[in-house]
Each structure stands twice: as C-alpha cells, then as structure tokens.
Image: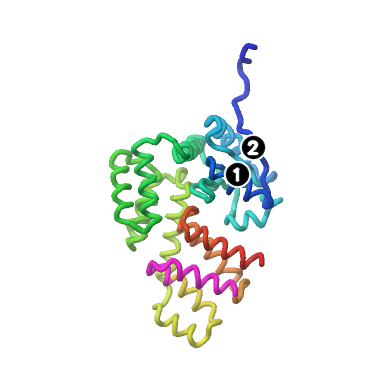
Amino acid sequence: MEQIIGAAPARAAVKDVTTATFMEEVVDASHDLPVVVDFWAPWCGPCKTLGPMLEKAVAETKGAVRMVKVDIDKSPELAQQMRIQSIPAVYAFLGGRPVDGFMGAVPESQIKEFIKRLVAAAPGAQVSPIEEALAQAKLAFTDGDIGTASTFYGHILQHEPGNIDAAAGMGRCYLAIGDLEKARAALAGIPEESAKTADCLALRAGIELAEQAEKTGPESELEARLGRDPNDFQARFDLAMAKFASGDRQAAVDHLLDLIRRNRSWNEEAARKQLLKLFEAFGVADPLTVESRRRLSTLLFS
C-alpha cells in the first residue's frame, strides 16, 4: 500500500501509570531501557502542548526509549514522593533510578536534546566524545571528585561554549567548593528559556540554599541550643542549613528528617519543603537523594 501523503507524525506507544504500577512499569523496566515519565493533569494547558512533542521525540528513537504518563490527580502520593510541585514535569529513569529531567514547558529542540541524551546513555549505545565527557563529569561529581568533574566540564566548554549541561555542571562545581559568586555567574550565563534541565534546576536550588545558609548562626551555637532543647525546631532547621553550607549533606538531611519526625507541621511544613529543595540541589540521580526520598516517604506515609 502506498504511503499516505501528509500522514500525522509518529507518536510513541504511551502507557498510563499509577502508584500501584510505577515500580514495575518504570523502575523495573528502566533496567532494560530508558523510561521517560510525563507527570501531567487534564486541566494543565502546557501539558497538552508538551505531551505530543515528547511522544513524537520518543517515537523517533524507534523503541530505544519508552514513555509513560502519570496523572497527578489520580496519583497524588506519587507526585509528592517525586517532588512534583508544578506541571508539566518530566523525569527519565535508567537502571532503576532517575537520571535526568526537567520541569515546565520547554521548546521542542530541548526535548530532542533530552531524548538524545537518554539514547546515548542506554546500554550499548554509541556516544560522541562530548557525551562521554559529560557522563564522566557527572559521575565524578556524584562521587565527590569535584576537581575531575570541573576538568571535564572545562574541556567540554572549550569545544562547545554553549553546552547547557556543561555550563550548569561547572556552576555546581563552583558551588561545591564554596565559590558562590562564580556559581551565580554560571547560572546567569545560561539563557532563561534553556535553564530548565535537571542540572540547571539543581544549580539554582543550590545557590538559593547557599544564600539561605549564609544567614544561619555558628554550628556550635546551634548545637548548644539543641543540647538544651532538642525540640528547638528553628535551631534544628538552621543547623541543617549550616551543615549543608559546610559540605555535610548527610547531616543536613538527617536534621531535617528528624524535624519532620518531631513536628511535621512546624512553620507550614518548612522542613519537608526544605528537604525537597535539597533533593533538587543534589540532583535526582544522586544516591543521597534516592536514599533520603525513601526515608521521607516512610515518615510521611507510615
């Protein structure tokens, strides 16, 4: 049969996923190939624009990437666990964990780059030197080897000055060594319409947290206050930020989780909201984010 001229562009076969099926359809399935999760709702106008573009980009991978959709109205607890504060929100899972994502309506070119990265990250994929260097940089950063990560990011930016992931990654490296001024400059150099990738969001959240941490008192004074009164919630909250500023991410998480356990509703759930911002700053794929999300879910839903 002759091909029909003007036929509609291909769309990905998309399955609706709920809290009950998320583990099987997303987490387990992502061990075989990347899975894109589109968090949406019927009332969301931008979702209706983004969804078809995302489906088209996934379909063009010819099965190398899979896509599912989550209606946040039907699965609110799942949206809360994934820190979905606004939609559209898109996450990519690979190897059983989130590895990339973005929030808000983005141009089709950015969607194609997002899918391209996933195809490159899939098992057995052929990657370009730039993509390989980005992967090495992100791995080094996650492992805490900031020097190696910044070297990789620097080389990438020499070859591709407009590489958004490398620019955001370099900004995160500056943030990790406490150079807030250069981190701000790195973020300012990224066009606003492109600053919606996971790394850009992590950089922005990290800067906001660092600025907030500058306003806390000395750790010794905050610890002394908690020694006198373990239920001094403001002191515990401020100590979490002080620990974050000093690079002790685990202690920052632990103090906020402890505050949630003691009084979840304190200051309009400030501890939970701050913890979610920490997750954003760490990055969706960071092992501490993954582990701490489980601990938070246990507290919230037990």
Disc 2 marks a residue whose amino acid type is: Val
Whichever of labels 1 and 2 marks the residue nearer the N terminus, that label is: 2
Which residue bears the numbered disc 1? 38
Q: Looking at the picture, does residue 222 appear above or below residue 152? A: below
Q: Position of residue 297 (x, y in %)?
A: 61, 63
Which sits in the foreground, 137 or 226? 137
Q: Please provide the residue range marked out in magenta.
A: 242-261
| Contact between labelled residues 2 and 1, with CB atoms less than 8 Å apart | yes
Q: Looking at the picture, does residue 238 appear above or below residue 1? A: below
Q: Residues within 10 Å of mark 2 (few under 14, many from 20)?
A: some
Q: Residue at x 53, y 63 (%)?
A: 292
Q: Position of residue 128 (x, y in %)?
A: 37, 35
The residue at the far top in this view is: 2
Which residue bears the numbered disc 2? 14
Q: Looking at the picture, does residue 238 appear above or below residue 282? A: below
Q: Looking at the picture, does residue 229 appear above or below residue 72? A: below
Q: Tell me: 177 left or right of 126.
A: left
Residue 119 lies in the magenta stretch: no
Disc 1 marks a residue whose amino acid type is: Asp
Tell me if I can see residue 188 in this picture.
Answer: no
The secondary element bearing badge 1 is classed as: strand
Q: Residue at x 40, y 55 (%)?
A: 142
Give the position of the N terminus as an image quadrant: top right
Q: Position of residue 107 (x, y in %)?
A: 51, 38
Report how far apart the C-alphas of labels 1 and 2 lie in the structure.
10 Å
- Pair 1/2: label in front: 2
Tell me if I can see residue 76 in this picture.
Answer: yes
Give the position of the C terminus as an image quadrant: bottom right
- Residue 44: name its quadrant: top right
